[in-house]
């Protein structure tokens, strides 16, 4: 770029001074443009990454409640399996507490989360697993053969459905 400009010190025409100022000015514009493009690219990538992750904070909390419910139920089942037909009052109290915990945690799982996991998951989780846990708790509090039998059938149905659809179920990872 050629233009007649005066050198600030000498007052003489200087093409090099002008070229240097244009370069600095253009360099600033290029740097600013580059920074702006990079910022837009980072913002776009962040938006894309967020779109790929369908889980929000409420979903992650529901996932924790789901896993806590499963964990408590599994531990109650282990105690029952170890005790066999007769378990001590201490074991019964532990099983009752764990079953109640499993039910409370299951109740905290959000329906929208269950729908995101799988379109059929809510039906099976609420209608089989959660009802089975509720019936098991009722049986522990006051022996009820029908409740125990129905609980076993419902829980078995949930496990069968879950095992058949395990690969289709998508849940956020939870750090323990």
Image: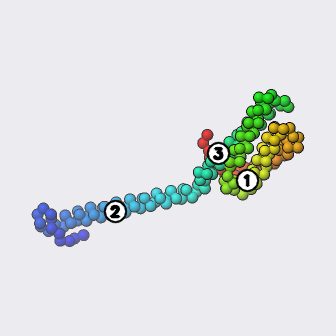
Query: Residue under circle 3?
Result: 64
Discs 3/1, front? 3
Q: Is residue 69 visible?
A: yes
Which is nearer the N-term, disc 3 or disc 1? 3
Disc nearest the viewer among 2 and 1:
1
Q: Is residue 32 above or below residue 147?
A: below
Q: Tell me the distance, in whole angstroms, between the alpha carbons under discs 3 and 1.
A: 16 Å
Mark 3: which secondary structure? helix
* Residue 13: image location, x then y, percent: 14, 68
Q: Which mark is residue 72?
A: none
User: Which residue is labeled 2 in the image?
Assistant: 30
State the separation of the CA atoms marked 2 and 3.
48 Å
| 111 lies left or right of 92 | left
- Toward which corner of the image does residue 28 lie, by quadrant? bottom left
Name the element at disc 2.
Answer: helix
Q: Residue 48, position in %: x, y?
A: 54, 59
Q: Residue at x 20, y 71 (%)?
A: 3
For the residues labelled 2 and 1, the Cα–Cα distance comes to 53 Å
Q: Residue at x 79, y 32 (%)?
A: 92
Q: Residues within 10 Å of mark 2 (few under 14, many from 20)?
A: few
Q: What residue do we see at 57% from left, 58% from top?
A: 51
- The residue at 35%/61% (across/down) is 32
Mark linked to residue 121: 1
Q: Residues within 10 Å of mark 3 (few under 14, many from 20)?
A: many
């Amino acid at each position: 770029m050629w233009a007649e400009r005066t050198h600030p010190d000498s007052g003489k025409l200087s093409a090099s001074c002008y070229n240097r100022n244009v370069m600095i000015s253009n360099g600033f514009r290029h740097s600013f443009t580059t920074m702006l493009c990079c910022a837009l690219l980072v913002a776009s990538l962040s938006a894309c990454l967020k779109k790929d992750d369908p889980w929000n904070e409420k979903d992650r909390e529901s996932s924790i409640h789901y896993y806590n419910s499963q964990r408590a139920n599994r531990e109650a089942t282990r105690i029952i399996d170890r005790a066999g037909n007769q378990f001590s009052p201490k074991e019964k109290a532990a099983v009752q507490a764990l079953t109640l915990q499993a039910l409370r945690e299951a109740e905290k799982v959000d329906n929208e989360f269950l729908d995101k996991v799988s379109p059929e998951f809510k039906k099976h989780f609420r209608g089989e697993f959660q009802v089975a846990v509720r019936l098991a708790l009722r049986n522990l509090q006051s022996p009820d053969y029908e409740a125990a039998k129905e609980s076993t059938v419902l829980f078995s149905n949930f496990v069968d459905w879950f095992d058949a659809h395990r690969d289709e179920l998508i849940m956020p990872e939870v750090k323990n």
